[in-house]
Amino acid sequence: MTGFWSVARAVAWRNIHNFFTNPAIIIPSLLFPLFFFTAFAGGLSRVDQVPGFDYASGYTTFVYGFVLLQASTFGGIFTGFSVARDFESGFSRRLLLGAPRHGGIVGGYWLAALTRAVFTISIITTVALIAGLDVNGNAIDLVGLYSLAVLVNAAAMLFGTGIAMRLRTMQAAPLMQVPAFLLLFLAPVWVPYDLLTGWVQSAASFNPVTLVLEAGRGFLAGEPEKVLPAFGVGLLLASLTVLWARGGLRSAERAA
Amino acid sequence: MRRTGLLFQVGVLARRSVVRTLRQPAMVVPSLVFPLMLLSINASGLESATHLPGFPTDHYFQFALAIPFVQGALFSANSAGTNVANDIESGFLNRLALTPLRRMALMMGQMAGIVALGLIQAVTFVVVGVAFGDGIAAGVGGAVVIVALSLVISLGFGLIGAFVALRSGSGEAVQGVFPLFFAALFLSSMSLPRNLIETDWFRTVATWNPVSYMLEAIRSLVIEGWNGEALALGFACAGGLALLAMVAASSALRTRMVRT
Protein backbone atom coordinates (compact mmCIF):
# COMPACT_ATOMS: atom_id res chain seq x y z
CA MET A 1 0.00 0.00 0.00
CA THR A 2 3.00 2.33 0.44
CA GLY A 3 3.36 2.66 -3.32
CA PHE A 4 -0.34 3.39 -3.70
CA TRP A 5 -0.37 6.22 -1.17
CA SER A 6 2.90 7.79 -2.31
CA VAL A 7 1.56 7.96 -5.87
CA ALA A 8 -1.85 9.21 -4.68
CA ARG A 9 -0.25 11.91 -2.53
CA ALA A 10 2.00 13.11 -5.34
CA VAL A 11 -0.84 13.25 -7.92
CA ALA A 12 -3.18 14.92 -5.43
CA TRP A 13 -0.58 17.50 -4.40
CA ARG A 14 0.16 18.43 -8.00
CA ASN A 15 -3.51 18.82 -8.89
CA ILE A 16 -4.41 20.73 -5.75
CA HIS A 17 -1.44 23.05 -6.33
CA ASN A 18 -2.56 23.64 -9.94
CA PHE A 19 -6.10 24.31 -8.78
CA PHE A 20 -5.16 26.93 -6.20
CA THR A 21 -2.51 28.67 -8.30
CA ASN A 22 -4.21 28.79 -11.71
CA PRO A 23 -7.00 31.40 -11.97
CA ALA A 24 -8.28 29.81 -15.21
CA ILE A 25 -9.07 26.66 -13.20
CA ILE A 26 -10.23 28.02 -9.86
CA ILE A 27 -12.42 30.89 -11.08
CA PRO A 28 -14.89 28.92 -13.24
CA SER A 29 -15.16 26.27 -10.49
CA LEU A 30 -16.27 28.96 -8.06
CA LEU A 31 -18.17 31.29 -10.38
CA PHE A 32 -20.64 28.88 -11.90
CA PRO A 33 -22.19 27.55 -8.65
CA LEU A 34 -22.19 31.11 -7.26
CA PHE A 35 -23.97 32.41 -10.38
CA PHE A 36 -26.57 29.70 -10.10
CA PHE A 37 -27.07 30.31 -6.40
CA THR A 38 -27.36 34.07 -6.86
CA ALA A 39 -29.62 33.87 -9.90
CA PHE A 40 -31.99 31.32 -8.40
CA ALA A 41 -32.03 32.35 -4.74
CA GLY A 42 -32.21 36.06 -5.62
CA GLY A 43 -34.16 36.10 -8.87
CA LEU A 44 -36.65 33.34 -8.13
CA SER A 45 -37.23 33.84 -4.40
CA ARG A 46 -40.93 34.61 -4.91
CA VAL A 47 -41.44 31.10 -6.28
CA ASP A 48 -41.88 29.92 -2.68
CA GLN A 49 -45.26 31.70 -2.77
CA VAL A 50 -46.52 29.47 -5.57
CA PRO A 51 -49.49 27.39 -4.34
CA GLY A 52 -48.19 23.91 -3.44
CA PHE A 53 -44.62 24.99 -2.64
CA ASP A 54 -44.25 23.23 0.71
CA TYR A 55 -40.56 23.50 1.63
CA ALA A 56 -40.58 25.01 5.10
CA SER A 57 -36.95 26.20 5.27
CA GLY A 58 -37.47 28.76 2.49
CA TYR A 59 -36.32 29.22 -1.08
CA THR A 60 -32.69 30.10 -0.31
CA THR A 61 -32.26 26.77 1.51
CA PHE A 62 -34.14 24.97 -1.27
CA VAL A 63 -31.73 26.37 -3.87
CA TYR A 64 -28.69 25.70 -1.65
CA GLY A 65 -29.60 21.98 -1.72
CA PHE A 66 -29.25 22.01 -5.50
CA VAL A 67 -26.14 24.19 -5.68
CA LEU A 68 -24.38 21.96 -3.13
CA LEU A 69 -25.07 18.95 -5.36
CA GLN A 70 -23.96 20.92 -8.42
CA ALA A 71 -20.68 22.01 -6.79
CA SER A 72 -19.95 18.42 -5.71
CA THR A 73 -20.66 17.10 -9.19
CA PHE A 74 -18.63 19.70 -11.04
CA GLY A 75 -15.76 19.44 -8.55
CA GLY A 76 -15.52 15.86 -9.84
CA ILE A 77 -16.14 16.62 -13.50
CA PHE A 78 -13.57 19.45 -13.59
CA THR A 79 -11.02 17.01 -12.16
CA GLY A 80 -11.79 14.83 -15.18
CA PHE A 81 -10.77 17.84 -17.30
CA SER A 82 -7.45 17.94 -15.40
CA VAL A 83 -6.87 14.26 -16.17
CA ALA A 84 -7.49 14.93 -19.88
CA ARG A 85 -5.13 17.93 -19.77
CA ASP A 86 -2.42 15.79 -18.12
CA PHE A 87 -2.72 13.27 -20.97
CA GLU A 88 -2.54 16.02 -23.61
CA SER A 89 0.60 17.48 -22.06
CA GLY A 90 2.27 14.05 -21.87
CA PHE A 91 2.50 14.17 -18.07
CA SER A 92 0.20 11.16 -17.57
CA ARG A 93 2.20 9.02 -19.97
CA ARG A 94 5.34 9.67 -17.94
CA LEU A 95 3.38 9.10 -14.73
CA LEU A 96 2.13 5.73 -15.95
CA LEU A 97 5.72 4.70 -16.75
CA GLY A 98 7.08 5.86 -13.39
CA ALA A 99 4.34 5.09 -10.85
CA PRO A 100 4.71 1.76 -9.01
CA ARG A 101 0.92 1.47 -8.35
CA HIS A 102 -1.36 2.85 -11.06
CA GLY A 103 -4.41 2.70 -8.80
CA GLY A 104 -2.74 5.46 -6.81
CA ILE A 105 -3.09 7.79 -9.80
CA VAL A 106 -6.89 7.53 -9.67
CA GLY A 107 -6.73 7.77 -5.86
CA GLY A 108 -4.74 10.98 -6.17
CA TYR A 109 -7.21 12.51 -8.60
CA TRP A 110 -10.01 11.57 -6.20
CA LEU A 111 -8.25 13.37 -3.31
CA ALA A 112 -7.84 16.42 -5.56
CA ALA A 113 -11.53 16.31 -6.58
CA LEU A 114 -12.56 16.07 -2.94
CA THR A 115 -10.36 19.04 -1.99
CA ARG A 116 -11.78 21.13 -4.84
CA ALA A 117 -15.34 20.27 -3.84
CA VAL A 118 -14.71 21.00 -0.14
CA PHE A 119 -13.21 24.39 -1.02
CA THR A 120 -16.03 25.35 -3.41
CA ILE A 121 -18.74 24.13 -1.01
CA SER A 122 -17.16 26.10 1.87
CA ILE A 123 -17.30 29.32 -0.16
CA ILE A 124 -20.86 28.68 -1.35
CA THR A 125 -22.02 27.78 2.15
CA THR A 126 -20.53 31.01 3.53
CA VAL A 127 -22.30 33.05 0.83
CA ALA A 128 -25.54 31.14 1.42
CA LEU A 129 -25.36 31.74 5.19
CA ILE A 130 -24.93 35.47 4.54
CA ALA A 131 -27.87 35.33 2.09
CA GLY A 132 -30.18 33.71 4.64
CA LEU A 133 -29.60 29.96 4.50
CA ASP A 134 -31.85 28.44 7.16
CA VAL A 135 -30.56 25.02 8.25
CA ASN A 136 -33.04 23.18 10.45
CA GLY A 137 -31.27 19.82 10.35
CA ASN A 138 -29.16 18.62 13.32
CA ALA A 139 -25.53 17.49 13.25
CA ILE A 140 -26.45 13.97 12.12
CA ASP A 141 -28.55 15.40 9.26
CA LEU A 142 -25.59 17.51 8.17
CA VAL A 143 -23.28 14.47 8.24
CA GLY A 144 -25.83 12.75 5.99
CA LEU A 145 -26.03 15.77 3.67
CA TYR A 146 -22.29 16.16 3.20
CA SER A 147 -21.73 12.38 2.97
CA LEU A 148 -24.11 12.37 0.00
CA ALA A 149 -22.15 15.27 -1.50
CA VAL A 150 -18.88 13.31 -1.10
CA LEU A 151 -20.41 10.25 -2.78
CA VAL A 152 -21.68 12.31 -5.70
CA ASN A 153 -18.31 14.05 -6.02
CA ALA A 154 -16.51 10.68 -6.15
CA ALA A 155 -18.94 9.28 -8.72
CA ALA A 156 -18.60 12.37 -10.94
CA MET A 157 -14.81 12.35 -10.68
CA LEU A 158 -14.61 8.62 -11.52
CA PHE A 159 -16.99 9.09 -14.46
CA GLY A 160 -14.93 12.00 -15.83
CA THR A 161 -11.64 10.18 -15.23
CA GLY A 162 -12.93 7.08 -17.05
CA ILE A 163 -13.70 9.19 -20.12
CA ALA A 164 -10.47 11.21 -19.91
CA MET A 165 -8.33 8.05 -19.63
CA ARG A 166 -10.04 6.43 -22.60
CA LEU A 167 -10.00 9.45 -24.96
CA ARG A 168 -6.94 11.28 -23.53
CA THR A 169 -7.89 14.67 -25.00
CA MET A 170 -9.52 17.87 -23.76
CA GLN A 171 -11.95 17.52 -26.66
CA ALA A 172 -13.65 14.89 -24.52
CA ALA A 173 -14.75 17.62 -22.08
CA PRO A 174 -18.33 17.88 -23.43
CA LEU A 175 -18.72 14.10 -22.99
CA MET A 176 -18.05 14.58 -19.27
CA GLN A 177 -19.95 17.82 -18.82
CA VAL A 178 -23.14 17.31 -20.82
CA PRO A 179 -24.39 14.08 -19.14
CA ALA A 180 -23.68 15.59 -15.70
CA PHE A 181 -25.45 18.80 -16.67
CA LEU A 182 -28.49 16.91 -17.99
CA LEU A 183 -28.76 14.67 -14.91
CA LEU A 184 -28.61 17.72 -12.64
CA PHE A 185 -31.12 19.84 -14.54
CA LEU A 186 -33.60 17.04 -15.17
CA ALA A 187 -34.21 16.89 -11.43
CA PRO A 188 -36.52 19.20 -9.40
CA VAL A 189 -34.11 22.15 -9.52
CA TRP A 190 -36.36 25.20 -8.98
CA VAL A 191 -39.55 23.74 -7.52
CA PRO A 192 -40.45 20.51 -5.67
CA TYR A 193 -41.18 17.45 -7.80
CA ASP A 194 -44.98 17.82 -7.46
CA LEU A 195 -44.86 21.27 -9.07
CA LEU A 196 -42.92 20.14 -12.14
CA THR A 197 -44.91 19.74 -15.33
CA GLY A 198 -44.52 18.14 -18.74
CA TRP A 199 -41.61 16.03 -19.88
CA VAL A 200 -39.28 17.33 -17.16
CA GLN A 201 -41.51 15.76 -14.49
CA SER A 202 -41.40 12.43 -16.34
CA ALA A 203 -37.62 12.68 -16.69
CA ALA A 204 -37.25 13.62 -13.01
CA SER A 205 -39.21 10.57 -11.93
CA PHE A 206 -36.61 8.29 -13.61
CA ASN A 207 -33.60 10.42 -12.75
CA PRO A 208 -31.60 8.97 -9.81
CA VAL A 209 -30.35 12.47 -8.96
CA THR A 210 -33.93 13.38 -7.93
CA LEU A 211 -33.63 11.01 -4.95
CA VAL A 212 -30.26 12.45 -3.92
CA LEU A 213 -31.52 16.03 -4.25
CA GLU A 214 -34.71 15.38 -2.28
CA ALA A 215 -32.79 13.57 0.47
CA GLY A 216 -30.31 16.47 0.67
CA ARG A 217 -33.12 19.01 0.99
CA GLY A 218 -34.74 16.80 3.63
CA PHE A 219 -31.51 16.84 5.67
CA LEU A 220 -31.36 20.64 5.42
CA ALA A 221 -34.98 20.99 6.55
CA GLY A 222 -34.46 18.59 9.47
CA GLU A 223 -37.05 16.24 7.98
CA PRO A 224 -34.97 13.43 6.44
CA GLU A 225 -36.74 11.61 3.61
CA LYS A 226 -35.74 8.98 1.07
CA VAL A 227 -32.41 8.56 2.92
CA LEU A 228 -31.83 4.88 2.19
CA PRO A 229 -32.76 5.09 -1.52
CA ALA A 230 -30.57 8.17 -1.90
CA PHE A 231 -27.53 6.53 -0.30
CA GLY A 232 -28.29 3.39 -2.32
CA VAL A 233 -28.20 5.43 -5.52
CA GLY A 234 -25.03 7.25 -4.41
CA LEU A 235 -23.23 4.00 -3.58
CA LEU A 236 -24.41 2.34 -6.78
CA LEU A 237 -23.22 5.28 -8.91
CA ALA A 238 -19.86 5.30 -7.08
CA SER A 239 -19.46 1.51 -7.54
CA LEU A 240 -20.32 1.59 -11.23
CA THR A 241 -18.00 4.51 -11.87
CA VAL A 242 -15.16 2.75 -10.01
CA LEU A 243 -15.44 -0.01 -12.61
CA TRP A 244 -15.69 2.59 -15.39
CA ALA A 245 -12.55 4.41 -14.18
CA ARG A 246 -10.71 1.07 -13.75
CA GLY A 247 -11.48 0.25 -17.39
CA GLY A 248 -10.21 3.70 -18.37
CA LEU A 249 -6.98 3.14 -16.47
CA ARG A 250 -6.44 -0.21 -18.24
CA SER A 251 -7.04 1.53 -21.59
CA ALA A 252 -4.50 4.23 -20.73
CA GLU A 253 -1.98 1.58 -19.61
CA ARG A 254 -2.29 -0.21 -22.95
CA ALA A 255 -1.74 3.06 -24.82
CA ALA A 256 1.24 4.19 -22.68
CA MET B 1 -15.34 49.88 -58.26
CA ARG B 2 -11.63 49.34 -57.73
CA ARG B 3 -10.76 45.79 -56.63
CA THR B 4 -9.20 47.23 -53.49
CA GLY B 5 -12.20 49.37 -52.46
CA LEU B 6 -13.73 49.22 -49.00
CA LEU B 7 -16.73 47.17 -50.12
CA PHE B 8 -14.50 44.64 -51.88
CA GLN B 9 -12.31 44.31 -48.79
CA VAL B 10 -15.33 43.89 -46.54
CA GLY B 11 -16.84 41.34 -48.93
CA VAL B 12 -13.72 39.17 -49.05
CA LEU B 13 -13.27 39.16 -45.28
CA ALA B 14 -17.01 38.73 -44.64
CA ARG B 15 -17.09 35.68 -46.92
CA ARG B 16 -14.12 34.19 -45.09
CA SER B 17 -15.71 34.94 -41.71
CA VAL B 18 -19.10 33.45 -42.65
CA VAL B 19 -17.57 30.31 -44.18
CA ARG B 20 -15.23 29.85 -41.24
CA THR B 21 -18.03 30.20 -38.69
CA LEU B 22 -20.51 27.96 -40.48
CA ARG B 23 -17.88 25.29 -41.19
CA GLN B 24 -17.32 24.76 -37.48
CA PRO B 25 -20.17 22.63 -36.11
CA ALA B 26 -18.64 23.04 -32.64
CA MET B 27 -19.45 26.75 -32.93
CA VAL B 28 -22.91 26.50 -34.49
CA VAL B 29 -24.47 23.45 -32.83
CA PRO B 30 -23.97 24.34 -29.13
CA SER B 31 -25.18 27.89 -29.77
CA LEU B 32 -28.48 26.42 -31.00
CA VAL B 33 -28.81 23.29 -28.86
CA PHE B 34 -27.95 24.66 -25.41
CA PRO B 35 -30.35 27.63 -25.46
CA LEU B 36 -33.17 25.41 -26.78
CA MET B 37 -32.42 22.71 -24.19
CA LEU B 38 -32.51 25.26 -21.38
CA LEU B 39 -35.70 26.77 -22.78
CA SER B 40 -37.36 23.38 -22.75
CA ILE B 41 -36.19 22.57 -19.20
CA ASN B 42 -37.10 26.03 -17.88
CA ALA B 43 -40.53 25.95 -19.49
CA SER B 44 -41.47 22.69 -17.77
CA GLY B 45 -39.59 23.33 -14.54
CA LEU B 46 -41.00 26.78 -13.87
CA GLU B 47 -44.50 26.50 -15.33
CA SER B 48 -45.89 26.77 -11.79
CA ALA B 49 -44.38 30.29 -11.50
CA THR B 50 -47.18 31.47 -13.81
CA HIS B 51 -49.54 31.03 -10.81
CA LEU B 52 -47.89 34.01 -9.09
CA PRO B 53 -50.26 37.00 -9.03
CA GLY B 54 -49.24 39.48 -11.73
CA PHE B 55 -47.33 37.01 -13.89
CA PRO B 56 -47.81 38.27 -17.46
CA THR B 57 -48.72 34.99 -19.20
CA ASP B 58 -50.24 31.57 -18.50
CA HIS B 59 -47.39 29.70 -20.17
CA TYR B 60 -43.83 29.99 -18.90
CA PHE B 61 -42.60 28.92 -22.36
CA GLN B 62 -43.85 32.25 -23.77
CA PHE B 63 -42.08 34.14 -20.99
CA ALA B 64 -38.82 32.18 -21.34
CA LEU B 65 -38.73 32.37 -25.15
CA ALA B 66 -36.75 35.63 -25.00
CA ILE B 67 -33.83 33.95 -23.16
CA PRO B 68 -32.41 31.89 -26.09
CA PHE B 69 -32.03 35.02 -28.22
CA VAL B 70 -29.72 36.63 -25.66
CA GLN B 71 -28.06 33.37 -24.70
CA GLY B 72 -27.32 32.66 -28.36
CA ALA B 73 -25.75 36.13 -28.61
CA LEU B 74 -23.47 35.26 -25.68
CA PHE B 75 -22.24 32.26 -27.65
CA SER B 76 -21.63 34.68 -30.54
CA ALA B 77 -19.37 36.75 -28.31
CA ASN B 78 -17.36 33.67 -27.52
CA SER B 79 -17.19 32.65 -31.18
CA ALA B 80 -16.19 36.14 -32.37
CA GLY B 81 -13.52 36.42 -29.71
CA THR B 82 -12.16 32.96 -30.42
CA ASN B 83 -12.02 33.62 -34.19
CA VAL B 84 -10.18 36.94 -33.75
CA ALA B 85 -7.82 35.39 -31.19
CA ASN B 86 -7.07 32.54 -33.62
CA ASP B 87 -6.23 35.11 -36.31
CA ILE B 88 -3.83 36.81 -33.91
CA GLU B 89 -2.27 33.59 -32.63
CA SER B 90 -1.86 32.14 -36.14
CA GLY B 91 -0.23 35.32 -37.45
CA PHE B 92 -3.04 36.01 -39.96
CA LEU B 93 -3.58 39.50 -38.56
CA ASN B 94 0.15 40.23 -38.89
CA ARG B 95 0.05 39.29 -42.56
CA LEU B 96 -3.07 41.41 -43.10
CA ALA B 97 -1.27 44.36 -41.53
CA LEU B 98 1.23 44.24 -44.40
CA THR B 99 -1.58 44.74 -46.96
CA PRO B 100 -3.44 47.99 -47.75
CA LEU B 101 -6.51 46.61 -45.93
CA ARG B 102 -8.55 49.21 -44.03
CA ARG B 103 -9.22 48.65 -40.34
CA MET B 104 -12.92 49.32 -40.86
CA ALA B 105 -13.07 46.56 -43.48
CA LEU B 106 -11.30 44.15 -41.15
CA MET B 107 -13.71 44.84 -38.29
CA MET B 108 -16.85 44.66 -40.44
CA GLY B 109 -15.64 41.56 -42.22
CA GLN B 110 -14.81 39.77 -38.97
CA MET B 111 -18.30 40.44 -37.63
CA ALA B 112 -20.09 39.08 -40.71
CA GLY B 113 -19.75 35.49 -39.54
CA ILE B 114 -21.23 36.39 -36.16
CA VAL B 115 -24.16 38.20 -37.77
CA ALA B 116 -24.75 35.14 -40.01
CA LEU B 117 -24.69 32.90 -36.94
CA GLY B 118 -27.01 35.32 -35.13
CA LEU B 119 -29.44 35.18 -38.06
CA ILE B 120 -29.51 31.37 -38.03
CA GLN B 121 -30.07 31.40 -34.26
CA ALA B 122 -32.81 34.03 -34.33
CA VAL B 123 -34.77 32.40 -37.16
CA THR B 124 -34.48 28.99 -35.44
CA PHE B 125 -35.69 30.36 -32.11
CA VAL B 126 -38.62 32.19 -33.75
CA VAL B 127 -39.64 29.00 -35.58
CA VAL B 128 -39.39 26.99 -32.33
CA GLY B 129 -41.41 29.66 -30.53
CA VAL B 130 -44.16 29.54 -33.13
CA ALA B 131 -44.14 25.73 -33.36
CA PHE B 132 -44.15 24.92 -29.63
CA GLY B 133 -45.61 28.05 -28.04
CA ASP B 134 -48.62 30.27 -28.51
CA GLY B 135 -47.03 32.20 -31.38
CA ILE B 136 -45.76 35.78 -31.47
CA ALA B 137 -48.40 38.23 -30.21
CA ALA B 138 -47.08 41.01 -32.49
CA GLY B 139 -47.47 38.77 -35.56
CA VAL B 140 -45.14 38.42 -38.53
CA GLY B 141 -43.94 42.01 -38.21
CA GLY B 142 -43.07 41.32 -34.58
CA ALA B 143 -41.09 38.23 -35.57
CA VAL B 144 -39.08 40.35 -38.03
CA VAL B 145 -38.39 42.94 -35.32
CA ILE B 146 -37.29 40.16 -32.93
CA VAL B 147 -34.82 38.89 -35.54
CA ALA B 148 -33.53 42.43 -36.14
CA LEU B 149 -33.10 43.11 -32.42
CA SER B 150 -31.36 39.81 -31.82
CA LEU B 151 -28.92 40.62 -34.67
CA VAL B 152 -28.04 43.91 -32.95
CA ILE B 153 -27.59 42.03 -29.65
CA SER B 154 -25.37 39.42 -31.36
CA LEU B 155 -23.32 42.19 -32.97
CA GLY B 156 -22.93 43.98 -29.62
CA PHE B 157 -21.76 40.90 -27.72
CA GLY B 158 -19.68 39.74 -30.71
CA LEU B 159 -17.82 43.06 -30.72
CA ILE B 160 -17.14 42.69 -26.99
CA GLY B 161 -15.65 39.25 -27.71
CA ALA B 162 -13.54 40.77 -30.49
CA PHE B 163 -12.41 43.57 -28.16
CA VAL B 164 -11.24 41.10 -25.52
CA ALA B 165 -9.39 39.07 -28.15
CA LEU B 166 -7.73 42.17 -29.66
CA ARG B 167 -6.66 43.49 -26.27
CA SER B 168 -5.34 40.18 -24.96
CA GLY B 169 -4.39 38.36 -28.18
CA SER B 170 -5.33 35.10 -26.49
CA GLY B 171 -8.18 32.63 -26.98
CA GLU B 172 -7.78 31.53 -23.36
CA ALA B 173 -8.56 35.07 -22.19
CA VAL B 174 -11.74 35.06 -24.29
CA GLN B 175 -12.79 31.78 -22.68
CA GLY B 176 -12.00 33.26 -19.27
CA VAL B 177 -14.35 36.20 -19.88
CA PHE B 178 -17.19 33.94 -21.02
CA PRO B 179 -18.57 33.35 -17.47
CA LEU B 180 -18.86 37.12 -17.00
CA PHE B 181 -21.19 37.31 -20.00
CA PHE B 182 -23.35 34.68 -18.36
CA ALA B 183 -23.37 36.66 -15.13
CA ALA B 184 -24.97 39.51 -17.08
CA LEU B 185 -27.74 37.15 -18.19
CA PHE B 186 -28.24 35.55 -14.78
CA LEU B 187 -28.45 38.90 -12.98
CA SER B 188 -31.29 40.14 -15.17
CA SER B 189 -35.06 39.69 -15.35
CA MET B 190 -34.37 36.35 -17.04
CA SER B 191 -36.49 34.16 -14.74
CA LEU B 192 -39.20 36.47 -13.41
CA PRO B 193 -40.54 39.91 -14.38
CA ARG B 194 -38.71 42.65 -12.47
CA ASN B 195 -41.84 43.66 -10.52
CA LEU B 196 -42.10 40.09 -9.19
CA ILE B 197 -38.47 39.84 -8.05
CA GLU B 198 -38.71 39.85 -4.28
CA THR B 199 -35.05 40.31 -3.31
CA ASP B 200 -34.33 44.06 -3.29
CA TRP B 201 -30.66 44.02 -4.30
CA PHE B 202 -31.36 41.57 -7.13
CA ARG B 203 -34.20 43.73 -8.45
CA THR B 204 -31.89 46.79 -8.35
CA VAL B 205 -29.13 44.96 -10.23
CA ALA B 206 -31.65 43.66 -12.79
CA THR B 207 -33.00 47.20 -13.26
CA TRP B 208 -29.51 48.58 -13.99
CA ASN B 209 -28.59 45.61 -16.17
CA PRO B 210 -29.14 46.40 -19.91
CA VAL B 211 -29.70 42.70 -20.62
CA SER B 212 -33.04 42.97 -18.74
CA TYR B 213 -34.28 45.51 -21.32
CA MET B 214 -33.12 43.38 -24.27
CA LEU B 215 -35.07 40.45 -22.83
CA GLU B 216 -38.11 42.60 -22.05
CA ALA B 217 -38.24 44.03 -25.59
CA ILE B 218 -38.32 40.55 -27.13
CA ARG B 219 -40.74 39.37 -24.43
CA SER B 220 -43.10 42.27 -25.10
CA LEU B 221 -43.40 41.27 -28.78
CA VAL B 222 -43.97 37.62 -27.85
CA ILE B 223 -46.51 38.16 -25.04
CA GLU B 224 -48.14 41.61 -25.37
CA GLY B 225 -47.85 42.74 -28.98
CA TRP B 226 -46.42 46.17 -29.81
CA ASN B 227 -45.02 48.06 -26.79
CA GLY B 228 -43.12 51.15 -27.95
CA GLU B 229 -41.38 51.83 -24.64
CA ALA B 230 -40.08 48.28 -24.22
CA LEU B 231 -38.86 48.22 -27.84
CA ALA B 232 -37.20 51.64 -27.58
CA LEU B 233 -35.38 50.58 -24.40
CA GLY B 234 -34.38 47.23 -25.90
CA PHE B 235 -33.00 48.73 -29.11
CA ALA B 236 -31.32 51.57 -27.19
CA CYS B 237 -29.55 49.13 -24.85
CA ALA B 238 -28.55 46.72 -27.63
CA GLY B 239 -27.52 49.52 -30.01
CA GLY B 240 -25.67 51.40 -27.27
CA LEU B 241 -23.79 48.25 -26.31
CA ALA B 242 -22.90 47.59 -29.97
CA LEU B 243 -21.72 51.19 -30.43
CA LEU B 244 -19.57 51.21 -27.28
CA ALA B 245 -18.13 47.82 -28.12
CA MET B 246 -17.40 48.98 -31.70
CA VAL B 247 -15.47 52.02 -30.42
CA ALA B 248 -13.55 49.86 -27.91
CA ALA B 249 -12.79 47.14 -30.48
CA SER B 250 -11.68 49.70 -33.11
CA SER B 251 -9.34 51.29 -30.60
CA ALA B 252 -7.95 47.88 -29.63
CA LEU B 253 -7.51 47.00 -33.31
CA ARG B 254 -5.61 50.25 -33.93
CA THR B 255 -3.26 49.44 -31.04
CA ARG B 256 -2.87 45.85 -32.21
CA MET B 257 -2.03 46.94 -35.79
CA VAL B 258 0.53 49.46 -34.51
CA ARG B 259 2.18 46.73 -32.43
CA THR B 260 2.26 44.52 -35.51
Image: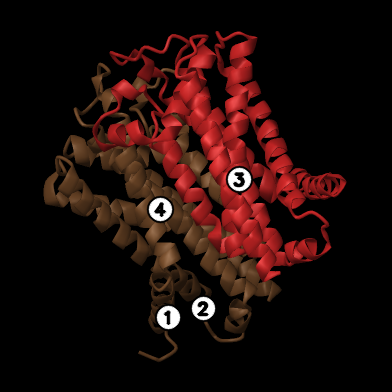
Chain colours: A red, B brown
Q: Are marks 4 and 3 in contact (CB under 8 Å)?
A: no
- Residue A181 position (above or below residue B16): above
The amino acid marked with disc number 2 is: Arg
Q: Is residue A88 visible?
A: yes
Q: Residues within 10 Å of mark 4 (few under 14, many from 20)?
A: many
Residue A242 badge: 3
Q: Residue at x 67, y 50 (%)?
A: A24
Which residue carries the number 2 mark? B102
For this orientation, the residue located farthest to the front is A1
Image marks 2 and 4: residues in contact by CB distance under 8 Å:
no
| Mark 3 or 2, closer to the camera | 3
**Callout 4: helix, strand or loop?**
helix
Which label belongs to residue B6? Answer: 1
For the residues tagged 3 and 2, is the chain the same?
Answer: no
Local secondary structure at mark 3: helix
**Dots 2 and 1 on the same chain:** yes
Mark linked to residue A205 = none
Please report contact status of discs 2 and 1: CB closer than 8 Å, yes or no: yes
Residue bearing mark 4: B73
Q: Chain of mark 1?
A: B
Residue that appears at 45% across and 49% down: B241
